[in-house]
Image (tube, rainbow, N blue to C red):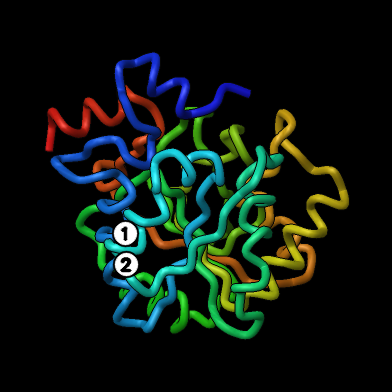
Amino acid sequence: MVRPFLVFKEAGFNYPKNLADLKGKPLVEATLENLKGLKTLDAKFICMVKRAENRVFHTGAVITLAAPSAAIVEVSAETSGAACSALLAIQDIDNEAPLILVNGDQLLSNVDLAEVILHFWERKLDGGIIVFEDLHPRWSFVRCDSNDIVVEAAEKRPISRLATAGFYYFARGSDYVLGATNMIKKDAHVNGSFYICPVYNELILLQKRIGIYKNHKNNYHTLSTPSDVEQYNRKN
């Protein structure tokens, strides 16, 4: 597995991806600001940071200054994917409260996230995903029925034109923990990694209702590579 810091360093960046300059701000600060709409719902931020990165670059301090109430969870070693990393925050997850998992290297523009959550609440969904139209296998995907209820989720495999935007809602924290645990027990990895999107397959098997919120592709900005960051800075 190629570590993100090495990729960014080789591209001429002096700091890890979380601290890459994005329009004059560290990426992690821009990401937290992008999620500020969730604060109207009294959301608590839980941020996963690699211990080695935190020790050298003090990413946790940057997060604390940007969002003073955020909880910092250090990840001591490489995990087997985002789904595993999220489980490391299990002591901070409220089993009965909604849980939202968001990629730390993306931005969503022109979308009211509080409105998105309200949409999921009003539909009485057990889970919800922001999606956009695309077919490239770099993304995760969902397939829906005629009522926009998810019937299948897949990672790096186009099963429909509905790609996910890295924003995953669970009506109860316990649903994520159960779904992720069941997925890992089944060893349902993709190329050696356990991703978050396929967790919904486990909930679907339990008769949970998972829905979508459609957004335009132009409103989704992935920042996972140095070229993504450079392109965003040029265009925005």
Give the x, y percent position of residue 172.
Answer: 62, 78
Q: Depth check: 15 or 119 in front?
A: 15
Real-space CA distance between mark 1 and mark 2, rounded to the nearest whole angstrom? 7 Å
- Which residue lies at the image location 36% right of the left edge and 70% below the top edge? 116
Contact check, label 1 and label 2, Cβ < 8 Å? yes
Please name the residue that numbered disc 2 is placed on: 67
**Quadrant where the N terminus lies?**
top right
Q: Is residue 83 above or below residue 87?
A: above
Secondary structure of residue under mark 1: helix
Disc 2 marks a residue whose amino acid type is: Ala
Report the side of 229 relative to 116 (left or right): left
Residue neighbourhood size for the residue with mark 2, other residues' Cα within 10 Å, grouped as few (<14), some (14–19), many (≥20): some
Please name the residue that numbered disc 1 is placed on: 32
Q: How many marks?
A: 2
Residue neighbourhood size for the residue with mark 1, other residues' Cα within 10 Å, grouped as few (<14), some (14–19), many (≥20): some
Sequence order check: which comes first, mark 1 or mark 2? 1
Q: Depth check: 212 or 221 in front?
A: 221
- Which residue lies at the image location 33% right of the left edge and 24% below the top edge? 226
Q: Is residue 214 above or below residue 159?
A: below
Disc 1 marks a residue whose amino acid type is: Leu
Q: Is residue 226 above or below residue 143?
A: above
Give the x, y percent position of residue 186.
Answer: 87, 48
Secondary structure of residue under mark 2: loop
Would you say residue 147 is visible in this rendering?
no
**Quadrant where the C terminus lies?**
top left
- Which residue lies at the image location 61% right of the left edge and 74% below the top edge? 93
Report the side of 62 relative to 128 (left or right): left
